[in-house]
Amino acid sequence: MEGHYETGRGVPLLLFGWPDEEAEEMRYTVEIPGLASLILTHDWEGEVKGLKDWPRDERPPVAWVFWSFRIMVGIGFLMVGIGLISALYYYRGKLFETRWLQLWWMAMMPSGFIALLAGWFVTEIGRQPYVAYGIIKTAEGVSPAILGPQVAWSLLAFVVMYTLVFGAGSFYILKLIGKGIPPGEESGQDDASDYYGHGLEAAPMRAAGKKPEAPHV
């Protein structure tokens, strides 16, 4: 995850960079001095072992792990950021009228799933070439009873199933968003109750997109 090839002390934290696995070095780095040593050893001058301390055939694909970890962490910061900004706009009473913030929320809809995948890549690719580190390698854990085509077809079935489920759910949610707020529920209505201090009508719970009927008198 850190992308350091050389063992050293006072090692910087690499925010970004490009791992050159052939030359065994990081190119075009953006770094914070000493921070990797502090995080990993709790000492600004702590020693951090580099990738060269392990044979090439004992290392995972560096670029995949390096960038997957940063995608996961970056999405986490975006989530925290949009939460704090939304809280500020809510406090000011402008949360529901700020279009750029609503568009940001829409863009963030798949972010949790992407962060989950990135974290999974870090875990699964990062432990290669082992199934259990130092005990059994991935090549040794292959079962001769299960053929490649069987694995491929089962994986394809999962991909198709999840694509249909997530696709249908995303289509429905985007359709509801596209319709906007139903008439009579906009903020600023004279007869609307003061919903959390922002003039929104506090309606009873109902199925998504359906407005409750008025009682018959």
Image: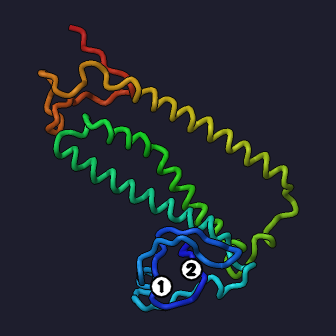
- Give coordinates of residue 185: x percent, y percent: 25, 24
**CB under 8 Å between discs 2 and 1:** yes
| Image vertical order of residue 74 relative to residue 190, above or below | below
Label 1 neighbour load within 10 Å: few <14, some 14-19, many 20+:
many
Determine the image quadrant of residue 104: top left
Q: Residue at x 50, y 68 (%)?
A: 16
Q: Secondary structure at mark 1?
A: loop
Q: Nearer the viewer, residue 208 or 81?
A: 81
In the rendering, which numbered label is found on residue 4? 2
Does label 2 or label 1 sit earlier along the sequence?
2
Q: Residue at x 75, y 70 (%)?
A: 138
Q: Residue at x 49, y 60 (%)?
A: 72
| Image vertical order of residue 95 relative to residue 6, above or below | above
Looking at the figure, which quarter contains the N terminus? bottom right
Residue type at the position of mark 1? Val
Q: Nearer the viewer, residue 186 or 162?
A: 186
Residue type at the position of mark 2? His
| Count of all numbered marks drawn on residues in the image | 2
Q: Secondary structure at mark 2?
A: loop
Furthest residue toward left: 190
Q: Residue at x 42, y 91 (%)?
A: 45
Q: Nearer the viewer, residue 200 or 125?
A: 125
Q: Which residue is mark 1?
A: 11
Looking at the figure, which quarter contains the C terminus? top left
| Image vertical order of residue 5 relative to residue 152, above or below | below
Separation (CA) of disc 2 from disc 1: 8 Å
- Give coordinates of residue 213: x percent, y percent: 30, 15
- Give coordinates of residue 146: x percent, y percent: 84, 57
